[in-house]
Amino acid sequence: MPKTIAILGSALFFAVAPTTVAGLVPWWITRWEFRPPFFDLDATRAVGILLIVAGLPGLVDSFARFALQGLGTPAPIAPTQNLVVTGLYRYVRNPI
């Protein structure tokens, strides 16, 4: 797969998959009916936001390695052509 198509495919998958899992599924469950914070502490929301922000660089790096080194996408419909064994993939089979 050409690098340009791999990059575009990974970008599309990056936009669709997390949006579905982190946005659409919670909306289906809650219809965005917000409740008081866990244990009535606003700190739990702050910790949640910090954890999301801390995980984003690893997610972006994993998607970039799929496209640039593996010449594919995380989507099974367009798998990588090369085995990626650098970055987080050096330690974990599937960091995404």
Image (cartoon, helix red, strand yellow):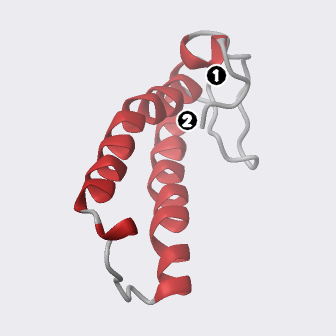
Q: Is residue 13 left or right of residue 1?
A: left
Q: Residue at x 60, y 38 (%)?
A: 96
| Tags 2 and 1 touching, CB below 8 Å | yes
User: Which secondary structure, mark 1?
Assistant: loop
- Asked if residue 33 is positioned above or below residue 73 in the image, the reply reads below
Mark 2, secondary structure of its residue: helix
Q: Which residue position holds label 2?
A: 6
In three-dimensional space, the C-alpha distance between marks 2 and 1, rounded to whole angstroms, equals: 9 Å
Image disc number at residue 70: 1
Label located before the other in sequence (2 or 1)? 2
**Which residue is drawn at the image coordinates 55% and 35% (left, top)?**
6
What amino acid does circle 2 point to?
Ala
Task: Please name the residue shown 45% across and 45% down the image.
Answer: 11
- Residue 25 in the image: x percent, y percent? 55, 75
Query: Would residue 53 be found to the left or right of residue 87 on screen?
Result: left
Label 2 crowd bin: few (<14), some (14–19), many (20+), radius 10 Å: many
Residue at screen point 52% across, 42% down: 10
Image disc number at residue 49: none
The residue closer to the viewer here, 3 or 93, is 93
Vertical arrangement, residue 40 with respect to residue 79, above or below: below
